[in-house]
Amino acid sequence: MATIRIHSSAGSYNVLCVRGILARVAPLTARLGDSTGTYFLSSPRVWNLWGKKVMASFQRRRNRGVILFDDSETAKRLATVEQIARKLIRAGADRHATLVAVGGGVVGDVGGFVAASYLRGVRLVHVPTTLVAQVDSSIGGKTSVNLPEGKNLIGAFYPPKLVIADPDVLRTLPHRELRSGLYELVKYGIIADGKLFEYLERHMPALLRRDPKALSWVIERSMRIKARIVCKDEREGGLRQVLNFGHTIGHALEAATGYRRFVHGEAIGWGMIAATLLGLASNQIRERDAGRIIRLTTSIGPLPSLAGIHARDLRGIISGDKKSRGGRVLWVLPAGIGKVKWGMEVSWPIVARAFAELPSFAMMARR
């Protein structure tokens, strides 16, 4: 079993990753200490697939409840947080309750924000069921919901007490969601780990087939990268900014299309290609390395069309993004395979030109 220790200002917690661990959620949660009740937050689809297995280990425990909600990106908003909080009140959840978020990134983000704000904070356990959630969003303590003006603009840093990740659940993951997670793995290779990048280049077909050995290797490797970064910079004051590679334009694409056209990883895929083009235009990266990044990104599969989206549609969203400083947009740009620079300024005309060239570069890479 992979056990990864995360240190945060609110205390340390473990990330446990092993096949079959879903059946042990109850005893693992019990080790955290006494609780007046356990409340599961999930979506109908995920709970239908895995709820029985999670609940089996809780059969002899009282004071438990299940709250299901829509896990689409459009439901990741304050209204959903209010609905869940009111259901918790009616269920009798007090300040010593434990919330267990079982699902993908939306469930984790919304559930985490509920835990951070309900009665000023209750215990949180993450049980991530998507590749994105296992390697990225469940680790590091970021919780958030969206606004029409932008993604993840309302939230809090609120680390969980435990993360329980079972790679076995990925076998029921829709293929589009699997691919979404693979873009995040590519991100880790670009920002911090040339060996991971090379492994992805060689084994992408196996990963797309859900080869268990290949998936286990890249999941643990990526978890350790995320853990190392967030332990050094919990609140994104410096190094943690590298995790935003591809996210500046990616988040803007999601917001500009009403969170309906792209799943998260697809938007980040486009964002990584765009950031790579900006790196080329800024003489930060060699053409050969830029080509490898674009080829690996596009090897995951075709990305949704950018038709009808123009750079001018994204400018206001990007300027209002939480990663901007005093109205200045600061970019994370690749400097090679396994290395990026953050806090980089790029003039808007260059950004607009790079965005206009995205489809043609992606098409050339797939030939």
Image (cartoon, grey):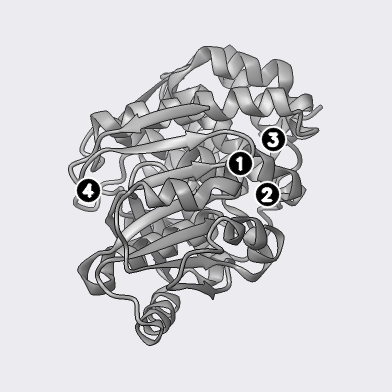
Dot in front, 4 or 2: 2
Q: For numbered disc 2, what is the local secondary structure?
A: helix
- 295 is higher (above) or lower (below) than 316: above
- 364 is higher (above) or lower (below) than 317: above
Q: How far apart are marks 1 and 2 (CA)?
A: 6 Å
Q: How far apart are marks 4 and 3 (CA)?
A: 30 Å
Q: Quadrant of residue 257 in the image?
A: bottom right
Q: Quadrant of residue 112 in the image?
A: bottom left
Residue carrying label 3: 362
- 359 is higher (above) or lower (below) than 310: above
Discs 1, 3 touching: Cβ within 8 Å: no
Q: Distance between the residues labelled 4 and 1?
A: 29 Å
Q: Which sits in the foreground, 260 or 18? A: 18
Q: Residue at x 41, y 82 (%)?
A: 91
- Image coordinates of residue 184 in percent, x first then y, are 55, 37
Question: Where is the C terminus found, in terms of image quarters?
Answer: top right
Q: Distance between the residues labelled 4 and 2?
A: 32 Å
Dot in front, 4 or 1: 1
